[in-house]
Image (spheres, rainbow, N blue to C red):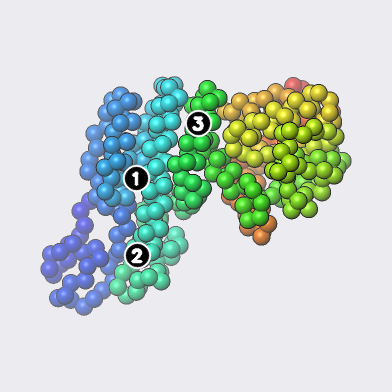
Amino acid sequence: MKPPTCRICGKAEWNHTCEGETPRKTKAVAPPTQEVATVSIPGSLPALVELAANRLLGARSSAEVLEARKLADMALHYAKVTQAANETHADCLRIITRAEIRMAGEIDRGREAGEVATHGGDRRSTNVRASDIDPVTLDDLGIPRQRAAEWRDLRDAGGEEVVERAIDSALAEGRAPTKADIAAEVHNHRAQGTGENEWYTPAAYIAAVRRVLGGIDLDPTSSAQANGAIGAVRFFSLEDDGLAQEWGGRVWMNPPYSQPAIAMFIDKLVDEFEAGRVEQAIALTHNYTDTAWFHRAAGAAQAICFTRGRIAFEAPDGRKAAPTQGQAFFYFGDDVPLFIEVFEEIGFVVVPHGV
């Protein structure tokens, strides 16, 4: 659409106060509302991917960046429907995420310039006088606030480096990478390490684990600070390298969620349980049912609880994380009825191999 023109001087009205009239409030235009040229959608998947890539490469406005993202999203859907090569899925995701990273920057710059309101429905800005300009909101731009936050998280987690790690891990497993893989890699960036970068399982879930296991002998993916809340008899920190240690007894595990670490810890848990060294165990992961490690865990577990809603993991300072997917608790052991009784309060429980 074309911008409205001033009724006095005929100039574009956005961000314009005519010298021939009393200054009045006008509406700031953030980059995403700029006019986009009509795009002809090609009929083949390779051509659509190429169009999206070229559109992003030549984008000079946020509107064109969003258009490129939309084209790449269409291509990704097409790739799923036609079961295209894994690399094609990867190419689509690269374009989508590059566009999202750029948009995170555009939104931040718009807020700094006073063209985008700091809060979704609040048009007030500390950078621009309300009498001079009325900044648009994310709602005006058709961008959900949660989506904008996810784009910023992706950028702050490492941007394209994080995306490539997620894609490489999926391709190494012989499958097509997904948006969920990238979300997991972003989450892992926030969840690994110690101090402010560490995120803990809320106490209510640990209490449920203790009710089933009767106690926790080992947490193989922990830290001294985290174990203050878990209360395991033994724990292995990052420096201890839990994968190199022998496990035993009753185990609680909330592993790092990035690849290949999560697959390695799941394999270790299953191997130690099947060898008889681990008596019982409960492991908490995201519910990535399309991954090889999830199927390895599900194939060995006696029961699985899929959470009702998403777990708000906690930082040491009390901040809450906002995962983009639900979680699953895997139970390894003989007391399936007790696991069902306790974890039915948390979600729905399935027993893969019967009681």
Number of dots carrying numbers: 3
Tell which of 91 and 63 is nearer to you.
91
Pinpoint residue 6: horizontal percent, then vertical percent.
17, 66
Residue 215 sits in which quadrant?
top right
Task: Identify the residue under disc 1.
Answer: 66
Q: Is residue 354 visible?
A: yes
- In the rendered image, the residue lying farthest to the bottom is 22
Q: Residue at left 66%, top 60%?
A: 317
Circle 2: element type:
loop
Asked if the residue under mark 2 is in contact with the one under mark 1, i.e. CB atoms within 8 Å, the reply is: no
Relative to 69, is 29 above or below?
below
Q: Residue at left 77%, top 22%?
A: 354
Relative to 102, is 85 above or below?
above
Amino acid, disc 1: Leu
Residue 260 sits in which quadrant?
top right
Mark before the other along the chain sequence, 3 or 2: 2
Structural distance between the alpha carbons of marks 3 and 2: 38 Å
Task: Identify the residue under disc 3.
Answer: 168
Pinpoint residue 274: horizontal percent, then vertical percent.
79, 23
Circle 1: element type:
helix
